[in-house]
Amino acid sequence: MTIKELLKYGEQLAQEHDKEETAIKLLLMHYLQQESYQLIMNMNQTVEVKQIDEFKAGVNEYVINNVPVQHIIGHEYFYGYNFIVGPNVLIPRFETEELVANVLAAYDEVFDGKEVNCVDVGTGSGAIAITLSLEEANLNMDATDISEEALVVAKQNAKNLDANVNFLAGDMLQPLIESGKKYDILVSNPPYIPEEEYVEALVKDNEPHVALFGGGDGMKFYRIIMSEAKKILNSKNILAFEHGWNQKEQMETLIKEFYPNSEYEILKDMNGKYRMTIIKNR
Ligand code: GLN
């Protein structure tokens, strides 16, 4: 079979099973070790039997067994950086790239080129912390996670991408409170899906529940972070969160309770859904 025929084979199978056709190209790139432009140039090339078998097995994993394509190929791009991912970390989402961009903008606005301490709470793959540290050299970056398995992945990503991030194991702010260090920026994309909410099988069956579910109302971790953040933040600070599209009012309630005098904005993601909150205390 040629590259063209393999692509067609996979895309047709994906279509029949209501799966993303774009994932097929990622699989083909992975198994043939070729970039997208190379596939296009080599469309009529015949593929070795061994590679055909591997590709078809991968397509089967994705289309029939409902395994995320990122788990099959082992990585995902975030903010242009290549992050390894696996079953122990949440696969980085596009929305979270917008959170990172907004944190960088808020840093420029509030701290304007100064060196500051920043922490990512619940870092998972390390996508937020590593990207922030690579994009803004003035951020001294720490990151926490309760999952030791996640931290193994995050540390590997920091190493691969040559990012200087200090990782701490522990529950939410606990390791930070214990260290006594003070921060200027806190960013977090905590688990925020309400316990009983419907989650599609591709996510629910493959991604770590410790990274997805945030208690009965999904707000558990914002409550913990906001109620304790004063212990680790300097008085001038930024708090930035990703949250569910329907959690705007609940975020406002928490801000009024814990940060009544702060400036804040609740921003929509590219899908037009309220997705992140940036709180500024100047
Ligand atoms: N955005 C993720 C999802 O919809 C949830 C991430 C999270 O809970 N932080 O699957």
Image (cartoon, rainbow, N blue to C red):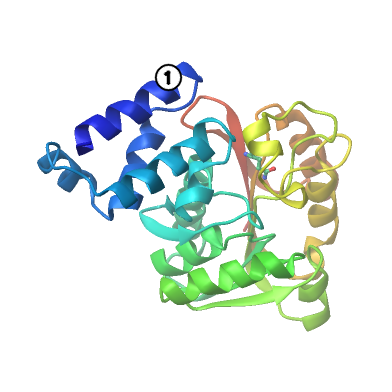
Instruction: Tell me the quadrant of ligand 1.
Output: top right
Q: Residue 128 falls in which quadrant of the image?
A: bottom right
In this rendered view, identify the residue nearer to me: 160 or 19.
19
Q: Residue at x 64, y 75 (%)?
A: 167
On screen, residue 110 above or below 118: above
Mark 1 Cα shell of 10 Å, populated few (<14), some (14-19), many (≥20): few
On screen, residue 117 above or below 203: below
Task: In the displayed orientation, state which residue is furthest to the top.
Answer: 16
What percent of the width, then of the height, locates residue 201?
67, 31
Residue corresponding to mark 1: 15
> Is residue 118 visible to us here?
no
> Is residue 91 toward the left or the right of residue 159 in the image?
right
Q: Residue at x 81, y 69 (%)?
A: 231
> Is residue 204 toward the left or the right of residue 161 in the image?
right
Q: Secondary structure at mark 1?
A: helix
What percent of the width, then of the height, locates residue 9?
33, 27
What percent of the width, then of the height, locates residue 51?
32, 50
Q: Residue at x 44, y 65 (%)?
A: 112
What percent of the width, then of the height, locates residue 75?
46, 55
Number of callouts in the render?
1
Q: Residue 218 falls in which quadrant of the image?
A: top right
In this rendered view, identify the residue nearer to me: 107 or 273.
273
Label 1 C-beta lies within 8 Å of the nearest ligand 1 atom: no
Residue type of the residue flagged with mark 1: Gln
On screen, residue 14 above or below 157: above
Q: Residue at x 24, y 52 (%)?
A: 34
- Quarter of the image containing the C terminus? bottom right
> Is residue 160 toward the left or the right of residue 227 in the image?
left
Task: In the displayed orientation, state which residue is furthest to the right.
Answer: 216
In this rendered view, identify the residue nearer to me: 198 or 17.
17
- Quarter of the image containing the N terminus? top left
> Is residue 55 toward the left or the right of residue 227 in the image?
left
